[in-house]
Image (cartoon, rainbow, N blue to C red):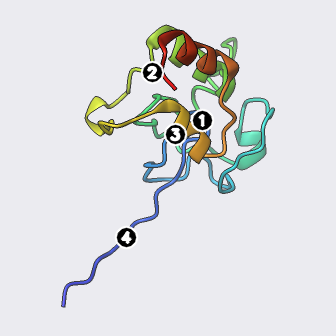
Amino acid sequence: MESIVKYQKFVCPCCGYDGLDTKPYKDIPNPPYPINLTPPYSNHWGEGSYDVCLCCGFEYGLDDEPGPGLKPDSFESYLKNWVQNESCKWFEPKSKPTDWDIVKQLEAAGISVPEYIRLARQLTGKK
């Protein structure tokens, strides 16, 4: 008899992608995540994994803690830049589901959908 091993997946605290192979931060809780935390997130959840989200491309432990003299990205600022300037371009396009929807992904992860995303959807006629 074959046994099926199901591996736990983790959720990106930036975009809500639920296919991460490792925890983004050592002690991060399950979603929904607390809002309005300031980077570096290692101060809140322990060391970042330095893995990169296949969806938005956020690198845990680097984008939020880039080093001396560099401005750290919060999840909110990174998400806004990714949506508005990169048009939600997937870091790993082969991993993008054909029916992918940013609003559904954020909502499923318990991440509040920013108003700029809702407004953009209204302008394009997408519900």
Name the residue carrying label 4: 6
Judged by depth in the image, the label closer to the viewer, 3 or 1, is 3
> Residue 97: in sight, yes or no?
yes
State how far apart marks 2 and 1 are (Cα).
Answer: 21 Å
Q: Badge 3 is on which residue? A: 105
Amino acid found under the numbered disc labelled 2: Cys
Identify residue for label 1: 61
Q: How far across and down, in percent of the image, does residue 30 sit? A: 65, 56
- SS under mark 4: loop
Q: Which residue does the numbered mark 2 point to in the structure image?
A: 88
Residue 38 drawn at (x, y percent): 79, 30
Amino acid bearing label 4: Lys
* Other residues around mark 2 within 10 Å, as few (<14) / some (14–19) / many (≥20): some
- In-front residue for pair 113/39: 113
Q: Is disc 1 surrounded by few (<14), some (14 to 19) or many (20+) residues within 10 Å? A: many
Distance from Cα at disc 4 to Cα at disc 2: 29 Å
Amino acid identity at mark 3? Gln
